[in-house]
Image: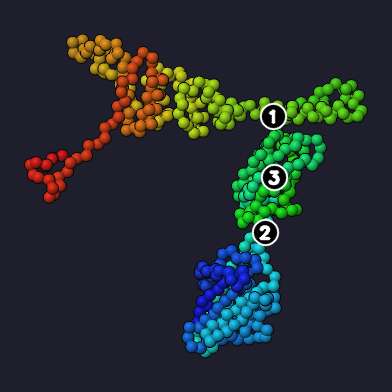
Amino acid sequence: MALTAFDSRLGADQGRLVPKRTTAPSGDHVFVLGSVPIDSTVALELVDVGPSGVDRTATQVWLGELLVFDGGRSPELLPEYAGARSLVLQTADTLRIVLDPLAPFESQAEVGVRVKSRTADAAAALDETYRFFIEDRTAPRVVAAQATGPRTVVVSFDEPVMVAGAPSFELRVLAGPAVPVSAASAVAEAELVSITLDTEMTPDITYEARAVGISDLSGNPVLPPFDRVRFEGFRPAQPAARGFDLWLLLPRHNRRDDTTGDLERFIRCLQEPTDLLLAGADAFPDIFDLERAPEAFLDAILADLGNPFAFELDLVGRRRLASLLVEMYRQKGTAKGIKNAVRFFLGLETTIEAFASDTLALGDAELGVSWILGPSDRFALYAFNVVASRVLAPAERRQLRVIVDYLKPAHTHFIDLIEPSAPIEAEHWELGVSELGTETLLH
């Protein structure tokens, strides 16, 4: 006896879902089906491959812990699962059962189906469990929001989401005079959505964000009333001892004469841009700090230092170059400076050799013993080669020449770049091909 088909369908004409069989920890066989529509029917076919047939009275089907079909009772189907599409049909060797729930399944529910039956002669029995999962029809919900910068807000949801379209959020001011803001862009990463605003928000003022272009990974959009969240406008950090309240800086008689409060409200309007200017001044150390400077300011720092190298470097490489560029200027015109710069950009060890190296060495050469006259030609006297420790790629050769041409002394001449030669492949003697005395090479 075997259960040859198990499916969950949306109507009678939908395609059958093929079960994936696994083994449960208890040893029972478990069949798992993927995402299933919430208004599906559950259809089973029990087939006896022998001559006895299926014992209908001994057949039982459970959904979860609920016994929904019992062939030994009347009615066989539980009324809650005896909808218009339900069916119990038995032939000589097959028993087909279709369960049609009157109420749809819950979204994202895991439904377990247990089938117990036997053949009419009790020679074979069946007791297997199946599980399938209902499709996601649950809309995501906004959980919280927090301003992380003057122009950035992070909104969290109860499940992973994606930005379905633009605009992604609508923002409005709930209390007090404040600068109106709108979402310029939004980027989703799992349950978090980072919003970039078109302008700075007013500190400590309550804003409301409404999600209008956000959906979960199944395409369910955010629905009211769980599409709104409130947050406080970002206030930049400031030194604890600072007191820069414009209203308190006014003379006391001006504050006393302000019986209508108009002057104070006007001064409070000026306080907001003042705080933004002070916050910008407080952030200046992060701009000229090479380790924390934003990318745009880092490029400006390199330009201000007169960076002569137009090489493409990543962000970390540019930070390192900005920290070493002054030292490169100090070592300009020396062999040490050339070798250090090549090592920085190419990770390559090099050696500087004079073009005419067999010359008199002061303090080493002996008169009449190792006395060697240097070149009389001024060009050869100030020429040199660069010896590389490995074979270079074409792009590396171009970069090395640029580095050397910039850092060498002005009166010297860079003649040649010497690289290790490629190993010579030995011509081995091949049996049956090479001729003795003609193509035989010893090596």
Q: Quadrant of residue 442?
A: top left
Give me the C-alpha separation between circle 1 and circle 2: 43 Å
Q: Position of residue 307 (x, y in %)?
A: 49, 23
Q: Nearer the viewer, mark 3 or mark 1?
A: 3
Amino acid at dot 2: Thr
Give the residue pinned by disc 3: 169
- Is 53 rendered above or below residue 272? below
Q: Residue visible at 69% across and 34% down?
A: 199
Asked whether residue 194 is in view, the answer is no
Q: Residue visible at 40% across and 17% down?
A: 333
Give the residue pinned by disc 2: 138
Asked whether residue 246 is in view, the answer is yes
Q: Nearer the viewer, mark 3 or mark 2?
A: 3
Q: Is residue 271 left or right of residue 343?
A: right
Q: Secondary structure at mark 2?
A: loop
Give the residue pinned by disc 1: 279
Q: Is residue 28 left or right of residue 107?
A: left
Q: Position of residue 224 (x, y in %)?
A: 74, 53
Amino acid at dot 1: Ala
Q: Nearer the viewer, residue 307 or 214?
A: 214
First in sequence: mark 3 vs mark 1: 3
Amino acid at dot 3: Phe
Q: Nearer the viewer, residue 440 or 10?
A: 10
Q: Residue visible at 77% across and 40% down?
A: 173
- Is 159 rendered above or below residue 328? below
Q: Position of residue 295 (x, y in %)?
A: 56, 31
Q: Position of residue 396 (x, y in %)?
A: 38, 30
